[in-house]
Image: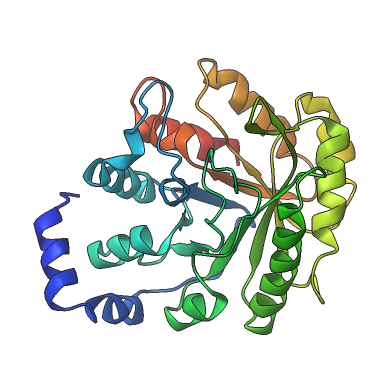
Amino acid sequence: MTIRIPDIVTLRATRPEAVAEAAARRTRRPLLGDSGRLMIVAADHPARGALAVGDRRLAMANRPELLERLCLALSRPGVDGVLATADILEDLLLLGALDGKIAMGSLNRGGLAGAGFEMDDRFTGHRPEDLARLGFDAGKLLLRIDYADPGSLTTLESTARAIDAMAALRLPTFVEPFISRRIDGKVVNDLSAQAVTTSVAIASGLGGTSAYTWLKLPVTADPDDMARVCETSTLPTVLLGGEVGADQDAAYEKWRTALRLPTVRGLIVGRSLLYPADGDVAKAVDTAVGLL
């Protein structure tokens, strides 16, 4: 697909209602298809100020390139949809790239990468009513818990209320929990089995109902521990991708092993697929789909 940025800008400037019109025209589908699996490409990083990919500090700041990579990924067989913030999802709507795809909105983007208030992760993205109004299919939120940071309590309470609001609208909420801490001023997520297990237990009990709650979990530092981690909850789970690594084959093997677990239903992966080390987006996406 050729991305014509001037056309998008002209529509946004002269006919802002075109976004709602495109949303109304969009062909929708069930969250899970016949396979019972879910393959979602994630692109909600920029609104958190997390623009780096590998040694490219501003890689995701190039919107035309990001949209091209997203459209290519969405065109590959087996890709079910995309997770993004309002600006990116609306660009994709105007491009017609979301027909027949899952559109998942990102709810909390207030915990900016590197900020002193990073753990006070307020809900500055999609509201549940926004997702319902545009006919989007699900929402995702990040829940980082630092026992030493009071801002985590605000995030916990806000997360519970967001889960309630989403459930009232019968919209699935994908909760991405971490036990985190600051090391030399930088927030670091603990991927040990104990920490991930604890985060799962906390996240699973938030809100007045868990009927529409999914979990979005990292593969633990020792992949052999994932079976015990996933025994902590009966909530359906997807695996997240994480940073781009030099040994992508090792990451694929970790995902393959975890995908055999009974609660794991798919993948939500971003930079690893959109900006693979060899630059071949189609190959990276097809490989990930093959794991399912």
Q: Nearer the viewer, residue 94 or 152?
A: 152
The structure residue drawn at horizontal position 54% and vertical position 56%, both measured from the top left corner, is: 110
243 to the left or right of 28: right
192 to the left or right of 269: right
146 to the left or right of 127: right
The image quadrant that residue 205 belongs to is bottom right
Q: In the rendered view of the protein, which quadrant contains the C terminus?
A: top right
The structure residue drawn at horizontal position 60% and vertical position 61%, both measured from the top left corner, is: 122
Q: Is residue 173 above or below residue 79?
A: below
The image quadrant that residue 86 belongs to is bottom left
> In the image, residue 176 lies at what x, y percent?
67, 51
> In the image, residue 132 lies at what x, y percent?
51, 80
Q: Is residue 142 above or below residue 218?
A: below
> In the image, residue 134 lies at what x, y percent?
42, 78
116 to the left or right of 55: right
The structure residue drawn at horizontal position 83% and vertical position 26%, both measured from the top left corner, is: 224
Figure disc tally: 0
The structure residue drawn at horizontal position 58% and vertical position 37%, both measured from the top left corner, is: 241
> In the image, residue 103 lies at what x, y percent?
46, 64
The image quadrant that residue 6 belongs to is bottom left
